[in-house]
Amino acid sequence: MREVKPISIDILNTFKQVDEDRLNELLADELKHLDRKIVVLDDDPTGVQTVHDISVYTDWDKDSMEQGFNEKNSMFFILTNSRGFTVAQTTKAHKEISKNIVDVSKKVNKDFIIISRSDSTMRGHYPLETNLLKSEVERLSGKLFQGEIIMPFFKEGGRFTIDNVHYVKEGEILVPAGMTEFAKDKSFGYKSSDIGEWCEEKTKGKYKSSDMIYISSKELRELNIEAITEKLKKAEGFNKIIVNATDYVDVKVFTIAFIRAVNSGKEFMFRSAAAITKVLGGVSDKELLTKDELVSKGNTNGGIILVGSHVNKTTQQLEELKNCKYPIEFIEFNQHLVLQENGLKNEVKRVIKVVEEKISSGKTVAVYTRRERFDLDTNDKDKQLMISVEISDAVTSIIGMLNVRPNFIIAKGGITSSDVGTKALRVKKATVMGQIKPGIPVWMTGKESKFPNMPYIIFPGNVGEISTLRESVEILMG
């Protein structure tokens, strides 16, 4: 395995500058020649963290799929929440999704591109999900996928790929992903930081890192679009294509080459973080959302912040939230009661009573799971996931059982925010309003939901600085 070390963030200033105005013109022209519907399958709800005015459907039945295909927008999201699924559950879901994409595509006579959007720290059911999509779509449609594009770059979250190594920003240092807490994930852990080696590790050697196609920063910054296009056109056998990126200009240059390769007759699938969706979907930049856009002036109730994630960054952000310039009531939810009969049920009753009382009197509450992680003493990854989901169901039911409409809702963590959106708020279709802070998306709930037309803030567990949660709450309470 390649030896990698943390490096200074200063390296980001060493890359060649690009004429962005010219690049944007080239990109806009190329996007006009992409006559495909972009279907983004999001394994948790945080993947809309770079877009706005885009639809998110929380199921993948044919009606939802057809609505997405018939929209004027070139792109729509399907929230699968599959990072919270067992292997059996995500297998079933991705077979259903493949069939519905192909059936609807034929019905409306519109071709498609699939983006399997996942974690920028490379966790999730990989390569299972993209392998399933490949085999099912090929079987049902006659398409043949030549390559899979691996692109975990996500600038807003501090995730950069340099010399094929994926890094996570921690303060002023870029730490190789394989050396972070994310690589130790009980369900989706890994060792390699070099993305080629990571692919080889995850595919158990079926694909060799030495055989993969690499798109370098040098090629991208020199706008060597023709050479990149030719590399893509040579892909075969679902080979892995690793894209280096430290800025959106890299994504834009790659997208131009990608479209040209697609229009030459090649088929690809993406396994990526959230940057490519913004660029390929032609989504414009937008200012961060303001309090006036997010909070109803007529609602005198308090807000609710629900914190389920246990990554270090979340715990640090939760501590910093206690320094908020506005008063917040902190309520701990003891998920360790999961092993007691009716333990979680009784804990929900206790917490909901306090929450309703506080919110009704105009106070904002922060409900957080006990910070000592609850991990089963087992190597059974599915069993560990199932316990996590049981705890998440209990935590999110607090919002599902609320009888008062809070002034705002923030959910922190991938599984937590998905369950709040789909199970507690019962959202079928949402529109992405934009972001409250870089990488922190806001849904506008649909008319069918528990609280219609409410901005719902989806705060990823592993995104932002230590102060970002506090700053977001201060915007809402200010």
Image: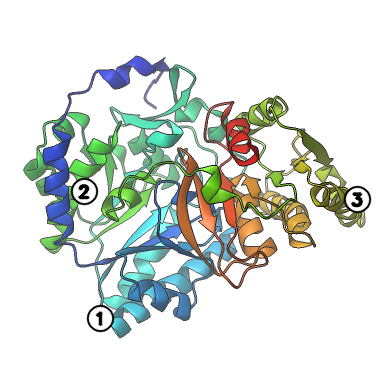
Q: Earlier in the sequence, mark 1 or mark 2?
A: 1
Amino acid type of disc 2?
Thr
Query: Would residue 315 be seen by someone viewing this image from the given angle?
Result: yes
Q: Earlier in the sequence, mark 3 or mark 2?
A: 2
The residue that disc 1 covers is 109
Amino acid type of disc 1?
Asn
Secondary structure found at label 2:
helix
Q: Which quadrant holds the C terminus?
A: top right
The residue that disc 2 covers is 255
Question: Which residue is pictured at 84% across the width and 50% down the height?
Answer: 338
Q: Which quadrant holds the N terminus?
A: top left
Q: CA distance from mark 1 to mark 3?
A: 53 Å
Amino acid type of disc 3?
Arg
The residue that disc 3 covers is 350
Q: Earlier in the sequence, mark 1 or mark 3?
A: 1
Q: Is residue 166 above or below residue 134?
A: above
Q: CA distance from mark 3 to mark 2?
A: 51 Å
Question: Which residue is pictured at 41% across the width and 71% down the height?
Answer: 98
Q: Nearer the viewer, residue 305 or 386?
A: 305
Query: Would residue 118 be seen by someone viewing this image from the given angle?
Result: no
Q: How is the image coloured?
A: rainbow
Residue 209, percent from left and from top? 30, 38
